[in-house]
Amino acid sequence: MATPQINPTVIKKGELDKLTPNIESYPEGIIIPFDKPLEWTSADVVRKLKFKFQYFFRNKKLKVGHAGTLDPLATGMLIICLGKATKISEQLQAEKKEYITDITFGATTPSFDLEKEIDAIYPYEHITKEGIEKALKNFIGEQQQVPPIFSAKYVDGVRAYEMAREGIEVELKSSTINIYNVELLEYNAPTAKIRIECSKGTYIRSFARDLGIALNSGAHLTSLRRTKSGSFKTEDTVTMEEFVSFYTTIGQ
């Protein structure tokens, strides 16, 4: 099926007050690059914005969605689609992403991040800045990656994380991903700050696990921020504070 040719209105940081309360003024829909707050799920953000925008546009049938899930412990770029723009959410989701992440060596968790408690300790004193940079070069390019068991992947019709939380052993198939560029920004042992440009479907938590293994240690994600999605950058994003200020001024 061909991708719909749609040209939505884009509302970036500082532009919410440009919206007019007539959804018919936006026949191609609206896209808002949104800065997802820490500990909010992507669905939480959509629910809040959907309720407020349905009120603003006086349209209870207004469709609101997002183009690319972020984990609750991640922050940053979440593209919100309103109206007809929801028809191109998959197209937007397929675009290149950029992340800035902190990866801590010397310990692992079942979720590969801070959602779960540390389950194993490893040596990390041998890891150097030069060693990390050398290892990172081997991650560039197309590759197979196994998702975390605490993920939204389906196994026999059930989300993997639901099975994992029940203590059911989960075996996930690898997926083809592409890491276009990866750069060590700084290393303050045992934590490395890394910038990653990658394809849709890349799990940065799995990247952390694999990097730890490559360096003869263990590792887990301690922070994650999506800084780009396609042509949208961090400086474009509407924050929750800006959105709250907007709907407060319209009487909600």
Image (cartoon, rainbow, N blue to C red):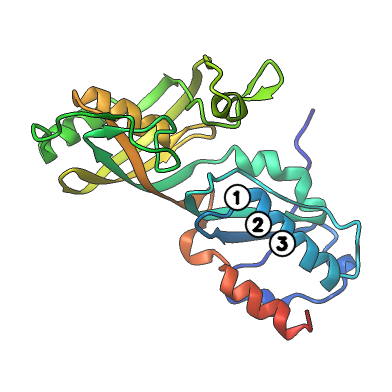
Say if mark 2 contacts mark 1, CB within 8 Å. Answer: yes
Residue denoted by label 1: 41
Callout 2: few (<14), some (14-19), or many (20+) C-alpha neighbours within 10 Å? some
Q: Which residue is mark 2?
A: 45
Determine crowd level at label 1: few under 14, some 14-19, many 20+ residues with C-alpha closer than 10 A.
some
Asked whether the beta carbons under mark 3 and mark 1 sit within 8 Å of each other, the answer is no
Q: Quadrant of the image for the C terminus?
A: bottom right
Taking 54 as reference, is 104 above or below it?
above
Q: Calculate the distance from the C-alpha at mark 2 to the C-alpha at mark 3.
A: 5 Å
Kind of residue sitting beneath label 3: Lys
Quadrant of image for the N terminus: top right
Amino acid at dot 2: Val
- Residue name at image x 47 percent, y 61 percent: 234
Badge 3 marks a residue whose secondary structure is helix
| Kind of element beneath mark 2 | helix
Tell which circle, 3 or 1, labels the residue nearer the N-terminal end: 1
State which quadrant residue 25 falls in: bottom right
Q: Give coordinates of residue 95: x percent, y percent.
A: 56, 41
Q: What amino acid is found at the position of numbered circle 1 in the picture?
A: Thr
Percent of width and height locating residue 132: 18, 35
Q: Residue at x 65, y 75 (%)?
A: 244
Q: Are marks 2 and 3 in contact (CB under 8 Å)?
A: yes
